[in-house]
Image (tube, helix red, strand yellow):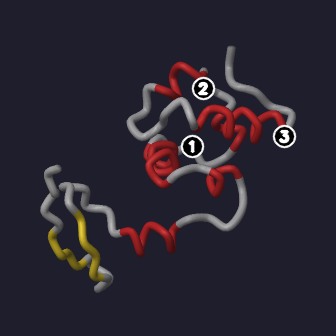
Amino acid sequence: MTTSKRSLRVCSNGHEYYKSSDCPVCPTCEQERKPDEGFLSTLSAPARRALEHHRITTLQQLSTFTEKEILQFHGIGPASLPKLRASLRGSGLSFKP
């Protein structure tokens, strides 16, 4: 079994963390950014960042996309779709056909 080399990093906010990949995201900062409520709070950090990158922060904005379009965003996987569908349905909305 190969062990990946973890390196100590320090983010711009001074948090120390170890990463074995080249991902620059600080886990402490990411946890602090996570919303306490709303549909974005139900998603994984990569899925949430993908939607935010595309300026999708409300269910109304999300409803203007098809499921296929959302799945093409880097960070969104099939596991995110049921959560997004449920959030939309709870507000009387759905994905664009």
Please say if the residues under marks 1 and 2 sit with CB atoms less than 8 Å apart: yes
Q: Pick whichever of labels 3 and 1 is earlier in the sequence.
A: 1
In the picture as drawn, the residue positioned furthest to the front comes out as 1
Q: What residue type is disc 3 on?
A: Ser
For image coordinates 70% across by 41% down, the residue present is: 59
Q: Is residue 55 or residue 1 the one in the foreground?
A: 1
Quarter of the C terminus within the rendering: top right
* C-alpha separation, residue under disc 3 versus residue under disc 2: 16 Å
For image coordinates 67% across by 67% down, the residue present is: 36
Looking at the image, is 64 positioned above or below residue 57? above
Q: What residue type is disc 1 on?
A: Ile
Badge 3 marks a residue whose secondary structure is loop
According to the picture, the residue beneath numbered tag 1 turns out to be 56
According to the picture, the residue beneath numbered tag 3 turns out to be 91
Q: Is residue 82 or residue 63 the one in the foreground?
A: 82
Badge 2 marks a residue whose secondary structure is loop
> Tag on residue 93?
none
Q: Pick whichever of labels 1 and 2 is earlier in the sequence.
A: 1
Q: How many marks?
A: 3
- Crowding at mark 1 (Cα within 10 Å: few <14, some 14-19, many 20+): some
* C-alpha separation, residue under disc 3 versus residue under disc 1: 16 Å
x and y percent of residue 32 in the render? 51, 74
Q: Pick whichever of labels 3 and 2 is earlier in the sequence.
A: 2
According to the picture, the residue beneath numbered tag 2 turns out to be 65
* C-alpha separation, residue under disc 1 versus residue under disc 2: 10 Å
Looking at the image, is 88 positioned above or below residue 65? below
